[in-house]
């Protein structure tokens, strides 16, 4: 896989976004997908996805996300980057979620009172599969 040069695109009904190789900030707003408006900001220090004005996912440092999919019970995607990366998702408040990375259950944790769910992952140019499900 590779970085997303278009900043945000749709492939096989999945969102793909982010470019961890660029040093200048890139931004795309009002991207329409399935009736929702998405916004992406990305560069080597941060990648952020918003849906209808609400933060969905943020990575520090920036990374590339492939095959992003979400519904009321699950979020899944492939992530690639170049170092230890903090990923934060905004989910339901005080809800338990099971985190799987590369089909291995890492933990079951609770989102905070604001709905934030964070974890760290070591990324390389080979994508890692991440899945977060309501527990």
Image: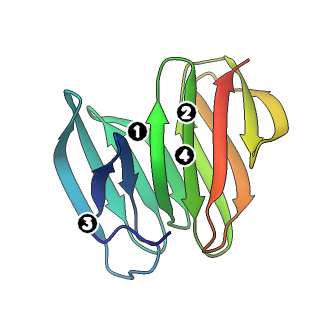
Disc nearest the viewer among 3 and 1: 3
For label 4, the residue is: 77
The answer for how far apart the CA atoms under marks 2 and 1 are is: 14 Å
For label 1, the residue is: 55
Asked which secondary structure carries label 2, the reply is strand
Q: Earlier in the sequence, mark 3 or mark 1?
A: 3
Classify 10 Å Cα crowding around label 1: few (below 14), some (14-19), many (20 and above).
some
In this view of the protein, which residue sits in the foreground, 24 or 122?
Answer: 122
Question: In the shown orientation, is residue 54 left or right of residue 92?
Answer: left
Q: Are marks 2 and 4 in contact (CB under 8 Å)?
A: yes
For label 2, the residue is: 75
Q: Is residue 82 above or below residue 66?
A: below
For label 3, the residue is: 6
Q: Is residue 102 above or below residue 41?
A: above
Q: Residue at x 71, y 47 (%)?
A: 119
Relative image position of residue 123 (x, y in whole percent): 67, 67
Q: Is residue 30 above or below residue 22?
A: above
Asked which secondary structure carries label 4, the reply is strand
């Amino acid at each position: 896989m590779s970085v997303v040069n278009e900043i945000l695109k749709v492939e096989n009904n999945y969102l793909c976004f982010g470019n961890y190789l660029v040093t200048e900030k890139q931004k795309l707003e009002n991207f329409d997908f399935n009736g929702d408006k998405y916004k992406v900001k990305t560069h080597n220090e941060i990648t952020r996805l918003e849906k209808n004005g609400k933060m969905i996912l943020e990575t520090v440092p920036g990374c590339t996300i492939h095959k992003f999919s979400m519904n009321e019970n699950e979020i899944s995607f492939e992530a690639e980057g170049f170092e230890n990366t903090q990923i934060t998702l905004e989910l339901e408040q005080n809800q338990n979620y099971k985190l799987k990375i590369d089909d291995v259950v890492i933990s079951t944790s609770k989102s905070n009172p604001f709905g934030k769910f964070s974890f760290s992952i070591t990324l390389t140019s080979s994508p890692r599969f991440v899945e977060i499900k309501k527990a």
